[in-house]
Image: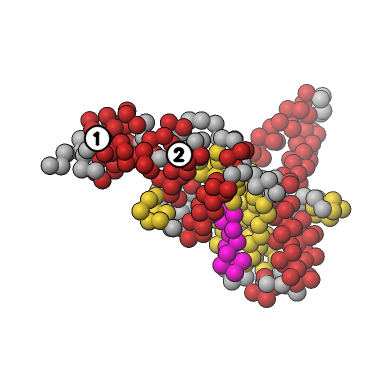
Amino acid sequence: MTTPITAKAVSELRQRTGAGMMDCKKALEENGGDMNASIEYLRAKGIAKAEKRADRSTSEGIVGGEIFNDGRSGALVEVACETDFVARNEDFGKVVATLVAHRVASVATDADSMLAESLQSDASQTVSEFVKAASARTGEAVRVNRTARFDGGENSLIGMYRHHNGKLSTLVQLTASSPEVAAHEATLQLAKFIAEHIAASAPMAVDRTGVPAEKLESERRIAEEQAREAGKPDAMIDKIATGKVEAFLKDVTLLPQAWVRDPAITIAALVKDHAERAGGSIVVDRFARLQLGAE
């Protein structure tokens, strides 16, 4: 006889295993309300143990990535764990590879929606359950912190850079004036150069239009206050503040930045040079930079 799934039963299972409410409800449903069978079910999936680790600090891990769709799409997934020892473990690397492969096929808009999806390689479990099982195997908290995905058109090209330690990866999307320009060797090289530069310089936006207005207002207020404290005449304060805001924008936006490989030229100049070599025009549309533990 099947035991009804009551809120009390869900609460009891949650207390006994430390698993989440929805996981407990599903376990009871899968096992006809049998408490002991449900506990065994959760333990077999690693959910009970994983839930108890959920509040541990995860400062290590890997940011995995892949370029696909003939170079017109790219995806990154930040997977965190507790220690570098686990991050360098072969099994953890396979976990990251599975999650990246899922992200390639996924329609998720962020990490939370991705976790709720059925795993592409095993539809019998969700991505969240797969991650919790990985936590049980490693004995550490494992989390999918963030993900990014770019999908461009036929004139687009995605560049990717992954740092040698696996803890920092970037994507950049370029749009060319034609498919031929997008496929040109100079454009391919440019995408790699810019993805690498973004990793090193951590720009805030492609250009000034991408910087939040509140950030610019804050920078202006700070500059004005500094000018007043320095005893500058009121008539000069606005001009001084404007100059400092412009200097700030030059420093934090991608196109005006000095290229890390050759500080004598800017990224904007680099784009122009490679576009001319490719025989057309190229625009930097957007980028993503995922560094383990950074916001």
Residue in front for this viewpoint, 237 or 13 = 13
Q: Residue tagged by mark 1?
A: 35
- Extent of the magenta region: 65-77
What element does badge 1 sit on? Answer: helix
Q: How is the image coloured?
A: secondary structure
Could you classify mark 1 by the number of other residues whose Cα lies within 10 Å: few (under 14), some (14-19), or many (20 or more)? some
For residue 183, say whether it is visible: yes
Q: Is residue 259 above or below residue 1?
A: below
Q: Is residue 103 visible?
A: no
Q: Earlier in the sequence, mark 2 or mark 1?
A: 1
Q: Amino acid at mark 2?
A: Ala
Q: Position of residue 58 (x, y in %)?
A: 56, 35
Q: Is residue 92 left or right of residue 270?
A: left
Residue drawn at x 75%, y 74% as measured from the top left: 279
Looking at numbered disc 1 in the image, what kind of residue is underneath it? Met
Q: Report the residue at 38% width, 35% height from top.
A: 48
Q: Quadrant of residue 133?
A: top left
Name the side, left or right, on which 271 lies relative to 156.
right
Q: Residue at x 55, y 46 (%)?
A: 92
Please say whether residue 268 is one of the residues in the magenta stretch.
Answer: no
Q: Quadrant of residue 172?
A: bottom right
Residue 136's disc is 2
Q: Residues within 10 Å of mark 2 (few under 14, many from 20)?
A: many
Screen quadrant of the C terminus = top right
Query: Is mark 2 in CB contact (under 8 Å) with mark 1?
Result: no
Extreme-bottom residue of the structure = 180
